[in-house]
Amino acid sequence: MNIEVTALSGPSGLPHLGRLRFGALEFACALGRSGLVAEKREGDGGTPIGSFSILELRYRPDRIEAPLTSLPLKITARSDGWCDAPEDRLYNQPVTLPYPASAESMWRDDHLYDLVMVLDYNLSPVRPYAGSAIFFHLANEEGGRLLPTEGCVGLRKPDMLQLLPRLTRQTKMQIG
């Protein structure tokens, strides 16, 4: 069974709102500020359309216990980063911080990456400028409203914890 992610239809003017379905489960989710995009580009704020394997689940051990899941599990370290510099040889790959090129910290001050799944978007082969750090992570909220991601899929923590035990190594995320 796969995770299905769709954008909400209608004239809401909020392209970053979507629905995530997995079997009988259905949740509101956050998408990139530009909504779903067929041709992802670095920094465009779009969530790429396609079918992506979930490669691993990372978690912050200082904030959350190891979650129940059969996905490959990795503890996030303070030095974990993800290169987002399109011209760097390690573009869209994990790196150790500090790193000489632009790289996002996986150990964030907010809670977005307390639980974060690495999707196999633009990894084999890596295409420069085609987008980096496309993850499935916890959503950011303000006043109960989901805020846009930078191009990832975001889910509220209680929903994520309900979903995780049901996922397998064969689960794919189908976006669009």
Image: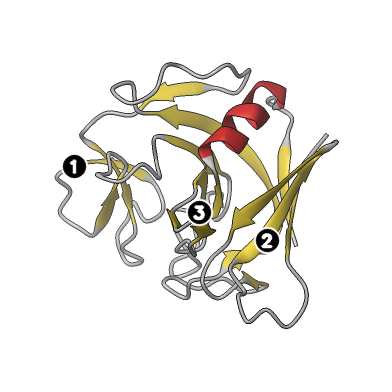
Spatial distance from mark 2 to mark 3, Cα to Cα? 16 Å
Spatial distance from mark 3 to mark 1, Cα to Cα? 19 Å
Residue 40 at x, y percent in the picture: 56, 71
Q: Is residue 37 visible?
A: yes
Residue that lies at the very extreme toward the front in this rendered image: 143
Q: Secondary structure under badge 3?
A: loop
Task: From the viewer's side, name the closer residue of 85 and 68.
Answer: 68
Q: Secondary structure under badge 1?
A: loop
Q: Quadrant of the N terminus?
A: top right
* Residue at position x 69%, y 63% in the image: 49
Residue 140 at x, y percent in the picture: 44, 53
Residue at which label 2 appears: 18
Left or right: residue 159 versus residue 93 is: right
31 versus 108 height, above or below: below
Residue at which label 3 appears: 134
Q: Earlier in the sequence, mark 1 or mark 2?
A: 2
Q: Earlier in the sequence, mark 3 or mark 1?
A: 1
Q: Quadrant of the C terminus?
A: bottom right
The quarter of the displayed image where residue 106 is located: top left
Identify the amino acid type marked 2. Gly
Question: Residue 97's mark?
Answer: 1
Identify the amino acid type marked 3. Ile
Q: Is residue 3 visible?
A: no
* Residue at position x 60%, y 23% in the image: 71
Residue 82 at x, y percent in the picture: 34, 48
